[in-house]
Image (cartoon, rainbow, N blue to C red):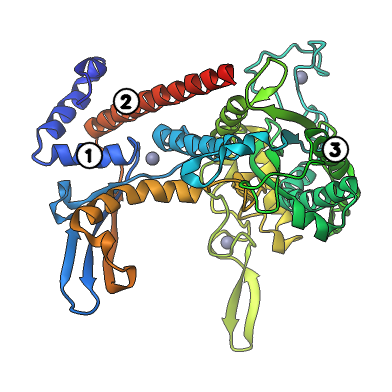
């Protein structure tokens, strides 16, 4: 149990509830559940059961039901990536991203990534969005074009100098196509590498593999950009040595060439009042080598992994966008729905949203004006580019990709990390029962689950927050110990 001093500042109502919770018969098991969620601030409650049966004899091998859990419920983590919604789950996500990027940089024997990836050419690259009009900023010379010296936390930063001329439509269309632009650039990069090595694409695939892990981030101005760790491996991925011609310099040079090549562009056709557009990366392409241990001049693995993880959770919150979609679900944001009469079906105005395509009143949302305008642009563009699902992704300012993704061979996936965590307890139980020793297809698993609400009472909430803090402190201590150990290895090498 956590030190009681942690709860000293609580109001009497919360403290009273906390004492009530702590006195309940199932409290130990409740604490156990919340520990497993990492101290989630808004856990999902489930009711249900799982039965393991022997397929041949029909004998029940193991039966689990939430009936014996506190309140008859199992609590699972909400998994929200936003720190403002659930600090514990956002922190877990940041930790997962950290391990994902780090495993791809330094190796992780548990996940079949050998430490020899450290000797592979690796860079940390940032691909930015182009300009959609001047915004308030803090230039090196100090004074913004508006004549003001903005403070670092000024909410005007990143917003349009002139909202009447800013290209909001272009900004959200860019976000919407950023994933395609990335894929085209990666394809081009393979060609640029092959060209420099004097190989055909096919020959390249036989000797050298390109792999990457990347995260998307919103800049203050609401434009998506990407941070990526890009690595060259041998033909079998992380476990095989890259050919001798594969150097960090060659990789860096190839990335610069690929990012500016005409192939690394995405065209958006004209529609309605929108003229045709061609998107390419912004001019601020940054490519830096990643070293295993810093000599002060280069990025270290640790710095890159921490940086990427930090941005993975910050991404959506940077611009103050809402947590959930804002489009009208009954018409999928089109503002039009199919009506049936004797003559057949006709397209008419959606009755739910009265043709606006919105499920929320944008004017009433508690978001900054710049984000509101970008969301409004998504809704206005929806009928012009119906395939792009701009209304559906309006709350993400048109961006429809994942905040972190990787090529197949980069390292373990976030899903695998989550699964490993979720399975831990189940596997402990199965192992205790000897179920793991049985052939997998001799066991029949039956299960039934039901949603039974979410959240905490005030007292539970205070307890969960303290559990989250304890877990965080423990993991940070472990991470620091690892860092010290790596530093020692580095000094010895
Ligand atoms: Zn949570
Ligand atoms: Zn300004
Ligand atoms: Zn509608």
How far is disc 2 from disc 1 in space, using C-alphas? 13 Å
Judging depth in this view, the residue of 34 and 253 nearest the camera is 253
**Helix, strand or loop under label 3:** helix
Which residue is label 1 attached to? Answer: 32
* Circle nearer the N terminus (3, 1): 1
Q: Residue at left 60%, top 75%?
A: 338
> Does 96 appear above or below 475?
below
Query: Can you see residue 382?
Result: yes
Front tag of 3 and 1:
3
Q: Residue at left 61%, top 38%?
A: 116
* Rendering coords of residue 146 (x, y %): 81, 18
Label 3 packing within 10 angstroms: few (<14), some (14-19), many (20+): some
How far is disc 3 from disc 2 in space, using C-alphas? 44 Å
Label 1 packing within 10 angstroms: few (<14), some (14-19), many (20+): some
Which residue is label 3 attached to? Answer: 256
Q: Is residue 454 left or right of residue 180?
A: left
Judging depth in this view, the residue of 160 and 202 nearest the camera is 202
Give the quadrant of the N terminus. Answer: top left
> Does 341 appear above or below 486?
below
* Rendering coords of residue 207 (x, y %): 76, 53
* Rendering coords of residue 276 (x, y %): 88, 54
> Does 60 appear above or below 426?
below
Q: Identify the disc placed on residue 487.
A: none
* Rendering coords of residue 493 (x, y %): 60, 21
Q: Identify the disc placed on residue 470.
A: 2
* Circle nearer the N terminus (3, 2): 3
Q: Is residue 53 left or right of residue 190?
A: left
């Amino acid at each position: 149990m956590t030190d009681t001093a942690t709860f000293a500042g609580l109001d009497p109502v919360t403290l009273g509830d906390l004492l009530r919770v702590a006195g309940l018969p199932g409290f130990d098991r409740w604490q156990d559940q919340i520990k497993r969620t990492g101290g989630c601030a808004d856990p999902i409650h489930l009711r249900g059961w799982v039965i393991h049966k022997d397929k041949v004899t029909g004998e029940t091998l193991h039966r689990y039901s939430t009936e014996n859990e506190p309140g008859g419920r199992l609590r699972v983590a909400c998994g929200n990536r936003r720190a403002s919604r659930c600090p514990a789950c956002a922190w877990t996500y940041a930790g997962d991203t950290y391990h994902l990027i780090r495993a791809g940089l330094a190796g992780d024997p548990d996940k079949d990534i050998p430490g020899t990836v450290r000797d592979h050419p690796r860079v940390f690259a940032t691909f930015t969005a182009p300009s959609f009009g001047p915004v308030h900023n803090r230039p090196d010379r100090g004074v913004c074009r508006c004549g003001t010296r903005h403070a670092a936390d000024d909410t005007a930063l990143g917003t349009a100098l002139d909202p009447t001329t800013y290209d909001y439509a272009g900004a959200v269309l860019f976000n919407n196509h950023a994933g395609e632009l990335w894929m085209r650039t990666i394809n081009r990069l393979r060609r640029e590498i092959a060209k420099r090595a004097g190989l055909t694409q096919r020959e390249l695939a036989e000797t050298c593999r390109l792999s990457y892990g990347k995260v998307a981030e919103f800049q203050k101005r609401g434009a998506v950009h990407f941070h990526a760790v890009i690595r060259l491996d041998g033909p079998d991925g992380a476990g095989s040595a890259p050919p001798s011609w594969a150097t960090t310099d060659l990789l860096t040079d190839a990335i610069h060439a690929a990012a500016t090549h005409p192939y690394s562009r995405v065209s958006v056709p004209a529609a309605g009042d929108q003229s045709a557009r061609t998107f390419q990366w912004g001019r601020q392409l940054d490519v830096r080598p990643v070293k295993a241990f810093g000599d002060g001049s280069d990025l270290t693995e640790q710095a890159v992994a921490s940086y990427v993880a930090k941005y993975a959770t910050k991404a959506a919150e940077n611009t103050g966008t809402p947590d959930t979609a804002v489009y009208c679900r009954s018409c999928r944001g089109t503002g039009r729905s199919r009506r049936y009469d004797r003559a057949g079906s006709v397209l008419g105005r959606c009755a739910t949203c009265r043709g606006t395509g919105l499920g929320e009143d944008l004017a009433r949302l508690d978001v900054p004006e710049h984000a509101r305008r970008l969301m409004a642009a998504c809704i206005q563009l929806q009928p012009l580019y119906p395939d792009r699902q701009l209304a559906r992704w309006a709350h993400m300012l048109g961006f429809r990709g994942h905040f972190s993704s990787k090529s197949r061979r980069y390292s373990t996936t976030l899903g695998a990390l989550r699964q490993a965590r979720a399975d831990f307890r189940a596997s402990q139980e199965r192992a205790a029962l000897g179920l793991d020793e049985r052939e997998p297809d001799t066991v029949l698993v039956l299960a039934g689950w039901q949603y039974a609400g979410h959240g905490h009472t005030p007292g539970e909430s205070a307890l969960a927050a303290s559990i989250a803090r304890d877990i965080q402190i423990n993991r940070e201590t472990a991470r620091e110990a690892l860092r010290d150990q790596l530093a020692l290895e580095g000094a010895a090498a």
